[in-house]
Image (tube, rainbow, N blue to C red):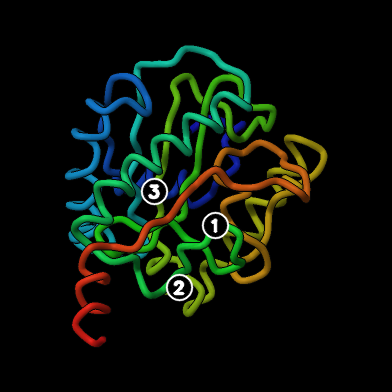
């Protein structure tokens, strides 16, 4: 992350400020990994502001798989997010700050009722800025994004990230869009996807929401 090929200014800043919470796991998207990852991510969602109120990130690195193509990494990324959601939905409702529909321009991933933007990194990424020696998922808080927007920091970071992307790659990632313009699900894996792309994520209604709905009928 401290190399010139890593374009994310926020990530570099978090690294310098030691505000990245890092945990290492076995194989991406297995039941054993999900069982270990889930409670740590929920704990981060609750306590992120104690790490840093503006630039705290949760980075999960994985032993496996080894180098895979972008399509396979995208599949594994969404398998992992689905597995996390399948646990989370039995305990928490979806964050009201984002939409659970992955086709919605207001989509965001939710764990512990907290909204996240997810960044996937791996050795086989075509985008230089998404290449990393190990498969990695970085969870960034939408709440902190909004705080950065309020103080102007988000816009400065965004401009610098896009400037570095152009310097590294010749153009920005075609999937990039601001929240509310297009579904951020298209950005998670880092792979360029077609307009007709359908996100392989199936959001479910939480058991707590079902109970509330049943009680009002």
Q: Position of residue 13 (x, y in %)?
A: 43, 49
Which residue is at 41% across, 54% downward? 140
Rounded to the nearest whole Å, what is the CA distance between mark 1 and mark 2?
20 Å
In the rendered structure, which disc, 2 or 3, sits on the residue that comes first in sequence? Answer: 3
Single out the mark in the foreground, 3 or 1: 1
Question: Eyeballing the image, is 203 above or below 35?
Answer: below
Question: Eyeballing the image, is 35 above or below 161?
Answer: above
Which residue is at 39% across, 43% downward? 82
**Callout 3 environment at 10 Å: few (<14), some (14 to 19), or many (20+)?**
many
For the residue labelled by badge 3, is the local secondary structure a helix, a strand or a loop? strand
The residue at which mark 2 appears reads as 146
In the rendered structure, which disc, 3 or 1, sits on the residue that comes first in sequence? Answer: 1
Single out the mark in the foreground, 2 or 3: 3
Rounded to the nearest whole Å, what is the CA distance between mark 3 and mark 1?
16 Å
**Callout 1 environment at 10 Å: few (<14), some (14 to 19), or many (20+)?**
many
Single out the mark in the foreground, 1 or 2: 1
Q: Which mark is residue 102?
A: 1
- Decide if residue 207 is on the left or right side of residue 15: left
Which residue is at 39% across, 36% downward? 80
> Pointers 3 and 1 in contact (CB under 8 A)?
no
* Residue 209, quarter of picture: bottom left
- Decide if residue 96 is on the left or right side of residue 217: right
Q: Position of residue 97 (x, y in %)?
A: 41, 74
Q: Position of residue 55 (x, y in %)?
A: 37, 57
The residue at which mark 3 appears reads as 139
* Residue 217, quarter of picture: bottom left
Pick out the residue farthest to the top.
66
Question: Eyeballing the image, is 16 above or below 49?
Answer: above
């Amino acid at each position: 992350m401290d190399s010139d090929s890593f374009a994310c200014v926020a990530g570099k800043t978090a690294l310098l400020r030691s505000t990245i919470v890092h945990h290492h796991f076995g194989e991406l998207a297995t039941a054993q990994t999900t069982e270990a990852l889930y409670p740590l991510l929920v704990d981060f969602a609750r306590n992120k502001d104690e790490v840093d109120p503006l630039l705290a990130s949760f980075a999960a690195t994985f032993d496996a798989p080894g180098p895979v193509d972008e399509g396979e990494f995208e599949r594994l990324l969404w398998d992992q997010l689905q597995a996390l959601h399948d646990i989370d939905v039995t305990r928490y409702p979806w964050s009201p700050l984002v939409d659970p529909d992955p086709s919605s321009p207001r989509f965001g991933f939710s764990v512990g009722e907290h909204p996240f933007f997810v960044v996937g990194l791996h050795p086989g990424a075509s985008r230089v800025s998404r290449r990393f020696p190990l498969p990695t998922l970085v969870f960034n808080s939408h709440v902190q994004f909004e705080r950065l927007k309020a103080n102007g920091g988000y816009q400065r970071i965004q401009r610098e990230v896009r400037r570095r992307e152009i310097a590294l790659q010749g153009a920005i990632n075609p999937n990039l869009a601001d929240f509310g313009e297009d579904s951020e699900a298209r950005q998670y894996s880092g792979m360029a996807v077609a307009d007709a792309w359908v996100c392989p994520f199936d959001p479910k209604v939480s058991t707590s929401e079902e109970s509330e709905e049943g009680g009002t009928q």
